[in-house]
Amino acid sequence: MEIFNTIPTIQYEGAKSKNPLAFKYYNADRVILGKKMKEHLPFAMAWWHNLCATGVDMFGRGTADKSFGAKEGTMEHAKAKVDAGFEFMQKLGIEYFCFHDVDIVPEADDIKETNNRLDEISDYIVEKMKKTSIQCLWGTANMFSNPRFMNGAGSTNSADVFAFAAAQTKKALDLTVKFGGKGYVFWGGREGYETLLNTDVKFEQENIARLMKMAVVYGRKIGFKGDFYIEPKPKEPMKHQYDFDASTAIGFLRQYGLDKDFKLNIEANHATLAGHTFQHDLRISAINGMLGSIDANQGDYLLGWDTDEFPFDVYTATMCMYEVLKAGGLTGGFNFDAKNRRSSYTVEDMFEGYILAMDTFALGLIKASELINDGRIDEFIAKRYASYRETEIGKKILANETSLEELSAYAEKLGAPALPSSGKQEYLESIVNNVLFG
Ligand code: XUL
Ligand code: CO
């Protein structure tokens, strides 16, 4: 039975189309830099926002009806969400989904019962996957919503809660493998703290690493060949989240010997909450060989929290795709960890959010490829560091063949060095506008 019966399959109609239910820029088979758009942009639907979130906020209950014709909190509802999700993805041409364990079934009081429900729903999902060839991008365990996780999961002060988190991680890994998922995510959830007056940071961080190591051992044992990911976020829900940003997460992974199995899942709105640009965290991940996957959304510069908006900012999407293209693509994909605004509560809004997001990233891809083909930025950067390649002293520095003594003797002879060449930021920004707007 068709659930979204007022919505057609969404087609590419081109930039001149005024049809709200059509793509203006996302043309799946269009080839950009030798690859189809859909190969550059493996888009994923986030189960939680799209099929579960109703627009509840601190001041009011939900506005959107996500019952899909079934009673909330039942297995019938869980199945209706599967039906709705697969129809939604098919109508948009989305080839992947991402999920938390408790997005796909209502959580029971007892983990054995929750796991039985997960077995039942995952059989149902696998059937749908076979029929549609839709795949799983990544799975994860929700170890932050239930009150037992108030002090964290891996970082909790309770050994029993730690054991419970391990049990949920095990099951979520089983499901990810059952779905053939490419990745497994650890978003820090409540792994952080509010005050050092009650917190042993070293103890907590070591315990998070223990949980992650057990996940790697178990995952590899059951045949998980994909990447584990940390998804950095600086704050919210905790004041101090341990996985603050890409640099912090990379340092943590290296410290605990997890860097061979883990990469990062970079979320735009998390990077901006950390006081970085999205592009910054992508670059830091990429240069460390850890750019795995992306949670594609955007925040609001006027609001200091995680608003998870559908991406609309073409400059940001362009610079994101510039990083992705330069990194040679993602091993993961683009998960729209985004939700409609509370007052956009209709079924059309659900589709229009994804159309906006997919078109924004398609535009970003087109414009990033144009920036690369234009070549002026690459050329400028290459010239900017030329003194290291073109002068004797520069070559020595790069070859690690000099010392403070030698450089100090050189500096004395030099007197005052000439100013370095101009950074030309305004000129470069005008190139970006020129490429974007012609
Ligand atoms: C929270 C967030 C999560 C993770 C998965 O800010 O981004 O939805 O992506 O747990
Ligand atoms: Co996310």
Image: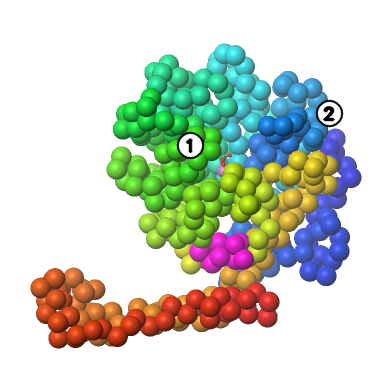
Q: Secondary structure at mark 2?
A: loop
Q: Secondary structure at mark 1?
A: loop
Q: Quadrant of residue 159?
A: top left
Q: Is residue 114 above or below residue 60?
A: above
Q: Is tag 2's residue or tag 1's residue first in the polypeptide sequence?
A: 2
Residue 358 lies, in percent from the top left, at: 69, 57
Q: Residue at x 11, y 80 (%)?
A: 409
Q: Is residue 417 above or below residue 184?
A: below
Does the magenta-highlighted stretch encompass residue 41?
Answer: no
The disc placed on residue 239 is 1
Q: Residue at x 65, y 74 (%)?
A: 436
The front one of 368 and 13 is 368
The disc placed on residue 314 is none
Residue 294 lies, in percent from the top left, at: 55, 51
Query: What amino acid is at disc 1?
Result: Lys
Taking the view exactly as shown, the residue that stands out farthest to the right is 6
Q: Which residue is mark 2?
A: 69
Query: What amino acid is at disc 2?
Result: Gly
Magenta segment range? 315-325
